């Protein structure tokens, strides 16, 4: 195995593990932010909560998408070295 293949193999594994770590982090954030009960005292709180919920779901979607793309890039780098 030459040094290029070893570097590609190692960097592919590292990038893949970073992507998987980011996916795990995304799921932990999603679970912790969406798992508590919500009570409302005034109608304005419902609107504020829904706007915040949509914003958080959009952020989580973007984080999950980026983590998935990073993991896929790691697999491609890993395969390129073999």
Image (cartoon, helix red, strand yellow):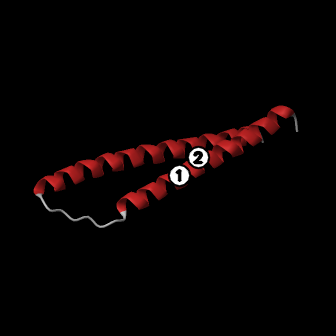
The x, y position of residue 35, in whole percent, is 37, 65
The x, y position of residue 5, in whole percent, is 80, 36
Q: Residue at x 65, y 49 (%)?
A: 17
Per the image, label 2 sits on a secondary structure element best described as helix
How far apart marks 1 and 2 lie (CA) works out to: 6 Å
Q: Residue at x 72, y 38 (%)?
A: 80
- Furthest residue toward left: 43
Q: Is residue 2 left or right of residue 52?
A: right
Q: Is residue 56 left or right of residue 39?
A: right
Residue at label 2?
Answer: 19
- Quick one: 55 or 48, which is closer to the camera? 48
* Residues packed near mark 1 inside 10 Å, few (<14), some (14 to 19) or many (20 plus): many
The x, y position of residue 67, in whole percent, is 53, 45
Q: Is residue 71 left or right of residue 47?
A: right
- From this view, report whether residue 10 is shown above or below residue 31: above
Q: Residue at x 11, y 56 (%)?
A: 43
Q: Is residue 47 left or right of residue 7?
A: left
């Amino acid at each position: 195995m030459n040094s290029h293949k070893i570097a590609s193999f190692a960097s592919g594994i590292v990038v893949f593990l970073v992507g998987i770590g980011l996916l795990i982090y995304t799921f932990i954030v999603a679970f912790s932010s969406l798992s508590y009960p919500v009570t409302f005292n005034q109608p304005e709180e419902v609107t504020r909560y829904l706007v915040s919920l949509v914003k958080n779901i959009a952020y989580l979607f973007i984080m999950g998408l980026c983590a998935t793309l990073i993991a896929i890039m790691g697999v491609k780098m890993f395969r390129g070295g073999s």
